Image: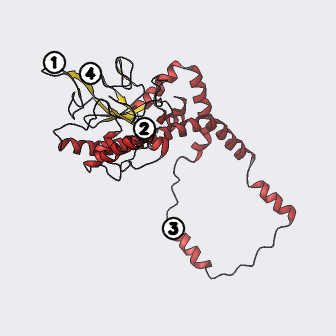
Amino acid sequence: MDENLIGYLLGALDEGTQQNVENHLRDNPDAHRKLDRLRRVLEPLSFDRDAIEPPAGLWMRTLSRIAEHRCRHLPHAPAPMPSQRSSYQRSRWRLPDVAVAAAILVAFSGLLLPLLSRWWQQHDIVACQNNLAEHYKALATFSDHHGSRFPAVETEQPVGRIMAIMHDANMVTPTMSMACPAANGRRAPLPMSVQELDELAARDPEQFQKTMRNMLGCYAYSLGYMEPGQDGVVRHYGLAPNFPDGMQPLMADRPPFDEGHQTLTGNSLNHGRWGQNVLFTGGQVKFLPSRFIGPDDIYLNRENKVGAGRDRDDRVLGCGWACP
């Protein structure tokens, strides 16, 4: 909250942030002392705050003066002596100027760096959200042409095949990136079809596993859920745009574990463990400071495993190598 003190003094905060700062000042005497110190440092800025009204006719007199002397040739000033030159250079900065500059530097150094760090963090979050929104456009178009269902994989297949399914449906666009902009810039999806993946799995299983780890890049996709049908047989289902109420997690930043390790240690690494962006089935993208939505862990099912949800309320997002 201290990084907002400068904006509070300058009246540059929005109403909500200003109220939060006032509450912080009321409950924190140390913040009050910092605010007073900043106010004293910024006092020299108030001396020339008010605009000076120029004398009437100043512009006319100025132009006349210029016209009077425009053709006048003045003799060159003599070069200053070394002693005069050093004296002139020393006088460019007065002691009060140096003192004010030093005080401002000291006061701002402890506040400016956290402020810049927070700004870049927010910039990366928004860039990642825009990238997920691009993915949603393609997924929603797929849904429009496939019975209002998002792409899903079979129970024994890795979820990275989703991108091959999208490739076969011509839904992969040049603006999509499989790398979170906050973590690794941009990376185009691998141009592989389902048939090519199946041939690779039969020819080179080890390379197939490596490819699956890269198919979704920095992101995770829904593993769907298990549910008994009308005949009582439990089957695997994918997600639909409006199920439930468009607020089922569909994609998100990659969970913080690697292949074979199902022990989570906090939030996604994409944003320095501050949280993760989550794309929902209705198209909304939100940054969640926790991987839990209520009691539900979006990266593990109720059995604390990487796999399909145990029912439609059990939300699980997996990396490219994960299987429902």
Answer with mark 2 or mark 4, whichever residue precedes in sequence.
2
The disc at residue 130 is none
CA distance for labels 1 and 2 = 34 Å
Within 10 Å of the Cα at label 2, are there few (<14), some (14-19), or many (20+) other Cα atoms?
Answer: some
Instruction: Find disc 1 in the rendering and name its residue.
Output: 232
Q: Is residue 174 above or below residue 268?
A: below
Instruction: Find disc 3 in the rendering and name its residue.
Output: 59
Q: What residue type is labelled 2?
A: Gln
Q: In which quarter of the image is the C terminus?
A: top left
Q: In which quarter of the image is residue 199?
A: top left
Q: What residue type is labelled 4?
A: Asp
The residue that appears at 82% across and 58% down in the rendered structure is: 87
Answer with mark 1 or mark 2, whichever residue precedes in sequence.
2
| Disc 1 to disc 4: CB gap under 8 Å | no
Instruction: Find disc 4 in the rendering and name its residue.
Output: 313
The residue that appears at 60% across and 39% down in the rendered structure is: 42
Q: Which amino acid does label 3 sit on?
A: Trp
